[in-house]
Image: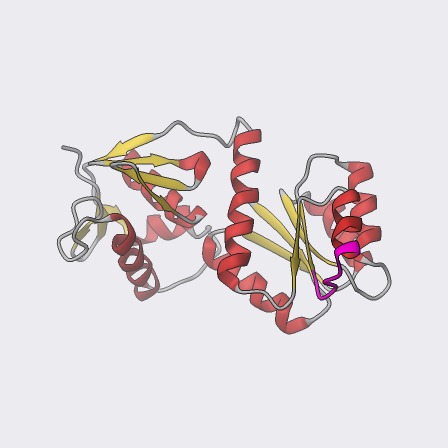
Amino acid sequence: MKVLVVEDDRLTREGLVETLCNEGYAVSQAEDGEAALEKFATERPDFVCLDVMMPRMSGYEVCRYIRQQDDQIPIIFISAKSEEIDKVVGLELGADDFIVKPFGLKEMMARIRAVTRRCLGRDAADTQEAFLMGDLEIRPAELRVVRRNKTIDLSLRDVRILQLLFEKRGQAVDRRVIFEVCWGLRHVQNSRTLDQHISQLRKRIEVNPKSPQIIKTVHGVGYRFDPT
C-alpha cells in the first residue's frame, strides 16, 4: 500500500516516513504543496498524510485539488493548528481525519491503520478471506488476528508474513524470500532485522513466545508454519 507524506518540517516528515516504512507501507514524500501534487499525479498513492501550513501551497489547497481528481482517496491532515474551526475546515474539504501536533506515534499509527482497513475493505482486489493458523483466525482486510474472542492488531508487514507462511505451510521459508515478499525486492536488510521483527510478532500472537507454535524457527534457513 502506497502512502504520500506531505510535510515541510524535515524531522517530522522523516519520522513519519521511517515509521510507515517499518509498518510495511511503500512511502513517498514531499516537502511542499506543489511537490505533493506532482507526486500525487505520478505515483497515485492509496492515501495521503497532509500538513496544513506549508510553503508554496497550503494543505487545504492540496486537499481541494486532490478531491477534484479523486473523491475516494483517504486524506489525513496533520497540523499544529488546533482550533476547532481548523478541524472543521479540513473535514469539510473532505479529509478523513485531522491529527494535531504534537502527536504520539501510537496514536498516529492507530489512525493510519483505521484508514488502511477502510482502503482494504473498499478495494476487493486487496481484500483476502480470513484463514486459520492453529487457534488464530487471521483477518487480512482488518489488519487483525483473533484468538478466543481476543482481538490483536497487526501491521501490514505482520499480515504479509503470516500470509506468506500460511501459503507455504509445511515448508521452510528462506529469510531471503521473506525479505523479498514482505519488505520489497529492493529493500536490503539483514537477518537480525527479520529475527527481531519475528520476535516482536511472536510476543503478540503466540500463547508462549518461548515455545512458538505458529511461527517456528528453521535453523540456518528461516521460518515455517506447520498446520495441524
Q: Which residue shows up at 33% across the image and 53% down it?
A: 176
Q: Position of residue 216 (x, y in %)?
A: 18, 49
Q: Quadrant of residue 29?
A: bottom right
Q: Is residue 55 left or right of residue 71?
A: right
Q: Coloured how?
A: secondary structure
Q: Is residue 80 left or right of residue 69?
A: left
Q: Residue furthest right?
A: 56
Q: Position of residue 101 (x, y in %)?
A: 65, 66
Q: Nearer the viewer, residue 137 or 158?
A: 137
Vertically, is 125 above or below 26? above
Vertically, is 81 above or below 60? below
Q: Position of residue 169 (x, y in %)?
A: 23, 36
Q: Nearer the viewer, residue 73 or 160?
A: 73
Q: Is residue 221 left or right of residue 13?
A: left
Q: Residue furthest front?
A: 84
User: Does the segment drawn in magenta span residue 80?
Assistant: yes
Q: Position of residue 17 (x, y in %)?
A: 57, 62
Q: Which residue shows up at 55% across the image and 50% down it?
A: 111
Does residue 223 appear in this view? Answer: yes
Q: Quadrant of residue 118?
A: top right
Specify the quadrant that holds the N terminus: top right
User: Does the segment drawn in magenta span residue 21?
Assistant: no
Q: Which residue shows up at 30% across the image and 66% down it?
A: 192
Q: Which residues fall within the magenta stretch?
A: 79-85
Specify the quadrant that holds the C terminus: top left
Q: Nearer the viewer, residue 160 or 191?
A: 160
Q: Nearer the viewer, residue 217 or 155?
A: 155
Does residue 169 appear in this view? Answer: no
Vertically, is 9 above or below 61? below
